[in-house]
Amino acid sequence: GRYRVISTKPMPGTRWIKLLTDQDCRVEICTEKKTILSVEDILALIGTKCDGVIGQLTEDWGDVLFSALKRAGGTAFSNMAVGYNNVDVDAATKNGIAVGNTPGVLTETTAELAASLSLAAARRIVEADQFMRAGLYDGWLPHLFVGNLLKGQTVGVIGAGRIGSAYARMMIEGFKMNLIYYDLYQSTRLEKFVTAYGQFLKANGEQPVTWKRAATMEDVLREADVISLHPILDKTTYHLINKERLAIMKKEAVLVNCSRGPVVHEVDLVEHLRANPMFRVGLDVFEDEPYMKPGLAEMKNAVVVPHIASASKWTREGMATLAALNVLGKIKGYPIWHNPNQVEPFLDENSVPPP
Ligand code: GLV
Ligand code: GLV
């Protein structure tokens, strides 16, 4: 192959490799055993000649790596993730490196995990599972692991983009929840869906579902029974959920985070979980991965999983394929396939920022 493309991790499937090798690329997959590569590890991988890199969300892609990639003759970098808070896009641009990400293929998979965590937290699935395995079940009781009924309750979505909207639809259609959402942009498609579904329910003699676009995030926190966080992580969403905002949530609310750990102030969250045993969380991401803040692991009202929201076979192979196409396209002289600055396809044309 004429072009040298590096993947910092083995990725699922083989199609992504074939795409590259069919197009004159030599693919080098890093086989380093440690889970998280340092900047130094990646510098060594890039070496003196490298056309493009597929990297992971655990890596710190800033000026050091992008200038090294530039020196090695590279032009393309793709994160194998939709989130790109680990990528300094300005530094990449300054070094003439195009940046790609992998939206779309993980939307439903991630939304399904958010739905799973919502149910697991609301119905105390993990606690109950641990109770069974510990041999503590000695007969049915009216009070045993009583949780929350979702039907007729309100689901709150903070960040109604691709993933947030898909999650909202699942919770509305699956459990007949009402919707309140907060986003800088209006999601008319989501609003139309809830309206139409409400009419369908009504025509069938059932209580219709309703929707509301909240003027402030606080309105969502105050009114919703299940709240799922789907913003990107940047300066404006860092510690979005803190002590003050937890305090205005319902005492028996469920909070789910499948976005990025630092969106939640985890120390404040642990304190809140301790003080409010009926408040429950489902967490896929953590502020300081792979660690949890002290106390979180002991909280019975927390369901925790290791950043697996996009972990379905179809999606992970799709992400690998998109990442490869991003890099390949740029190497071949096309604009990068998916880039973080592109207009979000889920936004309706008539979508307007908030008043
Ligand atoms: C995973 O967290 C992703 O951003 O794709
Ligand atoms: C519970 O198992 C019931 O039958 O109500």
Image: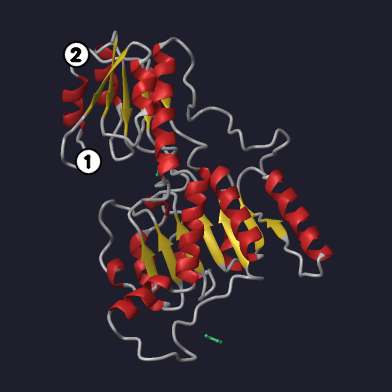
Residue at 37% from the left image edge and 32% from the top image edge = 79
Q: Is residue 48 left or right of residue 125?
A: left
Q: Which residue is mark 1?
A: 36
Residue at 35% from the left image edge and 86% from the top image edge = 137
Q: Are marks 2 and 1 in contact (CB under 8 Å)?
A: no
Q: Is residue 76 left or right of residue 222?
A: left
Residue 350 position in % (x across, y down): 73, 35
Q: Quadrant of the C terminus?
A: top right
Question: From what the image shows, is residue 43 above or below residue 10?
Answer: above
Q: Mark 2 belongs to which amino acid?
A: Thr
Q: Residues within 10 Å of mark 1 (few under 14, many from 20)?
A: some
Q: Quadrant of the N terminus?
A: top left
Residue at 22% from the left image edge and 21% from the top image edge = 46
Where residue 266 sits, quadrant-wise, is: bottom left
Quadrant where ligand 2 appears = bottom right
Q: Which mark is residue 48?
A: 2
Q: Is mark 2 within 8 Å of ligand 1?
A: no
